[in-house]
Amino acid sequence: MVLSKLFMSAKYTKFHLVGCLVCIAGITTTLVNDSDSNQKNSSLKGDMICMVGSALFGCSDVLQESIVKEFTRKELLSMLGIFGTIFALIQFLAFEFNSLRNDFDMTS
């Protein structure tokens, strides 16, 4: 909401703010509940990964909205497809290439 307000001058009603506060209360409840568990390190790490992922997803949404306002939907979807394919290929080569090479190893 903050990014939308800053970059796109979005207007929010009291209902939007109440919904945001309910979500923040839910996240806080989850963090407090996980802090009481026996596996503090792994649950805290998972919660932080989730928070970073949701923040990045929010940034992605705001950027997509601003692109759609300036360009057409076809351009947005084209760029998402092209760059999504490129990034997926890079991730595949970085993390799964050795596994694929072992699966198709014909020497043994």
Image (spheres, rainbow, N blue to C red):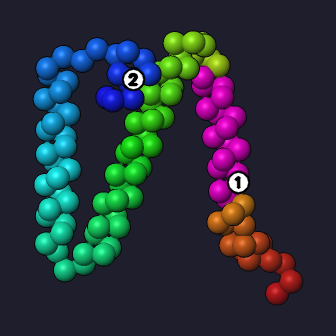
Describe residue 94's horizontal placement relative to residue 49 as left or right. Answer: right
Q: Residue at x 61, y 32 (%)?
A: 80
Task: Give the mark nearest the N terminus, 2 or 1.
Answer: 2
Describe residue 97's horizontal placement relative to residue 41 as left or right. Answer: right
Q: Residue at x 51, y 26 (%)?
A: 64
Q: Which mark is residue 90?
A: 1
Q: Is residue 97 above or below residue 25?
A: below
Quadrant of residue 36 in the image?
A: bottom left
Q: Give the magenta part as a residue range.
A: 76-92
**Gap between marks 2 and 1, in whole Å?**
33 Å
Q: Residue at x 13, y 64 (%)?
A: 33
Magenta-drawn stretch contains 87: yes
**Extreme-right residue of the structure:** 107
Describe residue 29's horizontal placement relative to residue 62 as left or right. Answer: left
Q: Residue at x 34, y 52 (%)?
A: 51
x and y, in percent, of residue 26 in the image: 16, 47
Magenta-highlighted stretch: main secondary structure? helix
x and y, in percent, of residue 61 in the image: 44, 30
Q: Which mark is residue 31?
A: none
Q: Which mark is residue 6?
A: 2
Q: Is residue 8 above or below residue 81?
A: above
Three-letter residue code for mark 1: Ile
At label 1, counting other C-alpha atoms closer than 10 Å, the crowd grade (few under 14, some 14-19, many 20 or more) is few
At label 2, counting other C-alpha atoms closer than 10 Å, the crowd grade (few under 14, some 14-19, many 20 or more) is few
Callouts 2 and 1 close, C-beta under 8 Å? no
Describe residue 57's horizontal placement relative to residue 77 as left or right. Answer: left
Which of 12/79 is in front? 12
Three-letter residue code for mark 2: Leu
x and y, in percent, of residue 82 in the image: 69, 34
Which of 93/63 is in front? 63
